[in-house]
Image: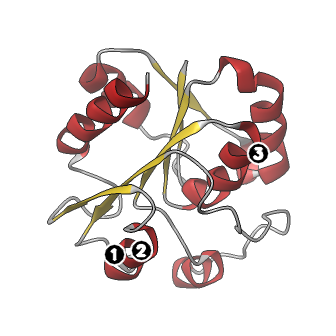
Amino acid sequence: MIYYINGWNGKNSTKAKKLTQYLGTEVKHLVFDNYNYNEIKQFIEKNALDIDMLITSSTSSYMAQRLCYENNIKLVSINPVIDIHNTFNKMGEKIPEDIPINDCLYGISQLVLINKDDTLIDWNQTFELYKNNYHVEVFEKGGHRAENLEEMSKYIVEYIDAIF
């Protein structure tokens, strides 16, 4: 099963429905109250054998990298946050206390999709961090909310075909 975990304040996201349409396979939207890392961790650990892949966005990508590493799960990261403290400061939000430092960037199978016109993350810094270890695709437009999800989906399909 493929699951989508939205970014901060994205619990009403329609991305899972759109991804289901674009990928031609069901993508379930996982919604967690108050963006609780431990709740996400418990779900993933309990269901790891049934999770073929996670598709994440923004801050959920930051958290998912560690969890995918620990549970051997494939990952697609859309506009992933690499500096959680700076990102929460930009959003004017307090960082949840239970989010661990992400030190597991390089031990997982991951596709990274980045939009240059993202106003929340530094696309170039993100690209530089990931380019030597993962397949990274960069898009001119789509913003942080990935309004170009249909275009991105073509690369997700290629990734799925390559790993399964």
The secondary structure type at the circle numbered 3 is helix
Instruction: Please report the residue visible at 45 percent of the width from the left and 62 percent of the height from the top.
Output: 133
Question: Which residue is at the front of the view, 10 or 114?
Answer: 114
From the image, tell me which residue sits under label 1.
123
Label 3: few (<14), some or many (≥20) within 10 Å? some
Q: Position of residue 146 (x, y in %)?
A: 30, 53
Label 1: few (<14), some or many (≥20) within 10 Å? many
- Answer left or right for 15 relative to 84: left
Q: In the picture, residue 158 is in which quadrant?
A: top left
From the image, tell me which residue sits under label 2.
126
- Answer left or right for 132 relative to 115: right
Task: Give the residue type that dot 1 points to.
Answer: Trp
- Residue 100, compared with residue 112, is above or below; it is below
Q: Position of residue 4 (x, y in %)?
A: 51, 35
Position of the N terminus, as image quadrant, is: top right
The secondary structure type at the circle numbered 2 is helix
From the image, tell me which residue sits under label 3.
70
The secondary structure type at the circle numbered 1 is helix
Q: Are marks 1 and 3 in contact (CB under 8 Å)?
A: no
Task: Give the residue type that dot 2 points to.
Answer: Thr
Instruction: Please report the residue visible at 40 percent of the width from the left and 82 percent of the height from the top.
Output: 125
